[in-house]
Image (cartoon, grey):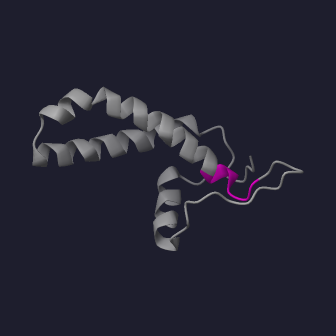
Amino acid sequence: MRSYLFILIRRIVAQVPRGPKARSESTGFVSDGFERALDGIELEVRAEIEAKYADEWNTSRLFKRWLLRQRIKREIAACVIQRSAHISDKALF
């Protein structure tokens, strides 16, 4: 199974547009279903983790914010990987 970080790197390198894709109304499948599922999971996880560190973020300065941002990114990636373990990378939602 592809890791979440691999997909993020692939998006950056390939410059994949983030706009809505055309859907087939008859089947309900989309070409990038796995990536869309990861995006949805990431939105949920990001909100939870950023809320968890909000007080620390507000009281910190530049260098500590940079360190905190790195910690938040690692924690988000770990949570997304954990929550998406049951989803196939070939899934079309």
Left/right of residue 27 with respect to residue 17 in the rendered view: right
Q: Residue at x 37, y 32 (%)?
A: 49
Q: Residue at x 69, y 51 (%)?
A: 33
Is 56 rendered above or below residue 19? above
Is 33 part of what is drawn in magenta? yes
Left/right of residue 65 with respect to residue 16 in the rendered view: left
Q: Which residues are magenta?
A: 30-35
Direction right: furthest residue: 26
Q: Residue at x 69, y 46 (%)?
A: 88
Along the line of sight, the residue nearer the viewer: 52 or 71: 52
Along the line of sight, the residue nearer the viewer: 65 or 74: 65
Is 38 rendered above or below residue 86? below
Displayed quadrant of residue 65: top left
Displayed quadrant of residue 85: top right
Name the spot of residue 78 as percent of width and height, x first. Answer: 43, 40
Name the spot of residue 67 as percent of width and height, x first. Answer: 19, 45
Left/right of residue 56 with respect to residue 11 in the rendered view: left
Direction bottom: furthest residue: 14
Q: Residue at x 27, y 47 (%)?
A: 70
Name the spot of residue 26 as percent of width and height, x first. Answer: 89, 51
Is 44 part of what is drawn in magenta? no
Name the spot of residue 41 as percent of width and height, x first. Answer: 54, 39
Left/right of residue 53 with respect to residue 48 in the rendered view: left
